[in-house]
Structures are given as structure tokens and as C-alpha cells.
Image (spheres, rainbow, N blue to C red):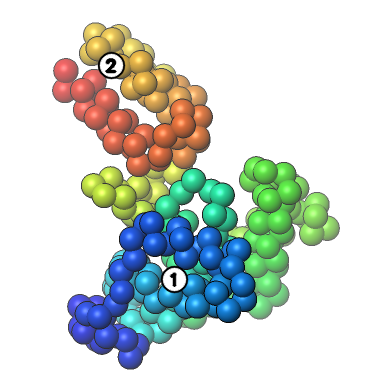
Amino acid sequence: MQYNKVEICGVNTSQLEVLSEKEKKELLKIISTGTPAESKRAREKMINGNLRLVLSVIQRFANRGENPDDLFQVGVIGLIKAIDHFDCNMDVRFSTYGVPMIIGEIRRYLRDNNAVRVSRSMRDTAYHAMQIKEELTNKLDREPTVEEIAEKMELPKHTVVLALEAIVDPVSLYEPLFTDGNDTIYVMDQIGDTSDDSDWIDEISMKDNIRNLSDREKRIIGLRFFKGKTQMEVAEEIGISQAQVSRIEKAALNRIKNG
């Protein structure tokens, strides 16, 4: 079955509803503050209005030989989880929050159905660790360390690390995570540059081109390559979106490189 066919999983994709960002925010607000009946209706409309988002996400898994109907159903589960857990107080688009949730649900499905089986006990340990991680993140308002997770689970650190690594698929650094307009965020954008590449940094620093950058461009380059921060961390510190950081960083590096 091709993804561009009219019907997938019994759903006519050509007739899928598309909600505006304003409509999504209104529905999410009703879901969290409305009466049970209002919340139920808004939830159903929110699900149906974001099925195209699920459809767009599963296309990146097209080459795995999986049944698209199965992936679509699993993706919808991720969508529902995103709707149920979305915090209306967060200043982010629903798709920014929902896409990683849908991807995560599909990845869990693929891991559980992988030909290379991980023992049930190790998988259970990994999923428990992920739950503990989420609990500690909410409690500490930051991502917990492996030591903190292991201590909470009353398990040795190496046991937790092995369990988590056992359920993780290898991911290309160039795999796209999210696209906002013309800006695509890749896996490599989420990773801090902690390498000691002093020669490269010194070479860039000596170039006159860097002096022509704006103050914001200099700050972003400094945070990213001198302090090894991820684009998400830079975005939070400066107060702009990660997509904007990505765009400004790429433009600044091109100007430095090309003179």
C-alpha cells in the first residue's frame, strides 16, 4: 500500500480535516477546562483534525517494510497521548510537541516487533526507567542523571544503562526530527558539540568575517561551539525558537566560511 493512496487504515486521506493553530489551541483549552461532554467532543475533533500529522510522520518509516495501516494506528496512539499530556501553558505549537510523541510511539512499536529480540525483563527495566525519568523530570524541572534514575529504581547504574541501550535503535545524525516551515531540525542539532576542536575554533576566531556578525549571531555561535550547548538550550537561553536558532546558526556559519 502506498502512502499517497486515498485510503489508509479505512480512512479516506483526501477528506482528512486540517485544523488551524488557533483552532487547535481552542480545542486543547476545552479539553482541559470544559465539561466532560465538551472535553470528549473537543478531544475527538482534535484527534480527527491531526490525522494528517500522523500520516506525515509515518512516511519517514516507509522503508522498514512495515504495514502502513499498522504504523498509522500506532501513530494515532502517539497522537492521543500527545493530546492528553499537552500542557496549554507551554508556549509551543502542538505539532512541535506531538511529532516527537508520535515518533516515540512508532519506535517503541518497531522495537517490540524487531527480529532481534530483547529479553522481556530488560525491556521492562528500560520502560520503567523511562517512566522514572519522566517523573523525575517533572519533579526536578530538569532532565535527571542516570545515577538519579538508578537510585530511584534501586538498581545498579550499569543495569539501567544496558537496559536503555538495548531498546534504542541506531539513528542517523541526519535524520530529520521536525520541520517548521523551511527549517528542518536534525538529530545532530540536538547534540552538544563537546569535542575539543580548538584548532578549528582558533581558525574561525581569527577570521575578520566573524566581526561582521550581529551580536545575536555571535552569541549563538559562542554558545553552540565554544560552550557546546544544543540548539534547544541556546533557544531557551536567548528566548527564541529552536528553528530560529538553526536558521541563524546556518546563515552565520555560511558567512564565516564563505567570507
How many angstroms separate mark 2 from mark 1 (CA)?
A: 43 Å
Towards the viewer: 2 or 18: 18
Q: Position of residue 62 (x, y in %)?
A: 29, 73
Q: Position of residue 229 (x, y in %)?
A: 49, 32
In the rendered view, does 213 fall on the left or right side of 21? left
Q: Residue at x 27, y 25 (%)?
A: 252
Towards the viewer: 112 or 215: 215
Q: Position of residue 28 (x, y in %)?
A: 50, 63
Towards the viewer: 57 or 227: 57
Specify the amino acid type for callout 2: Leu
Q: Residue at x 68, y 51 (%)?
A: 138
The image quarter containing residue 130 is: bottom right
Count of residue discs: 2
Which residue position holds label 1? 46
Q: Is residue 36 visible?
A: yes
Which residue position holds label 2? 213
Q: Is residue 2 visible?
A: no
Residue 93, compared with residue 74, is above or below; it is above
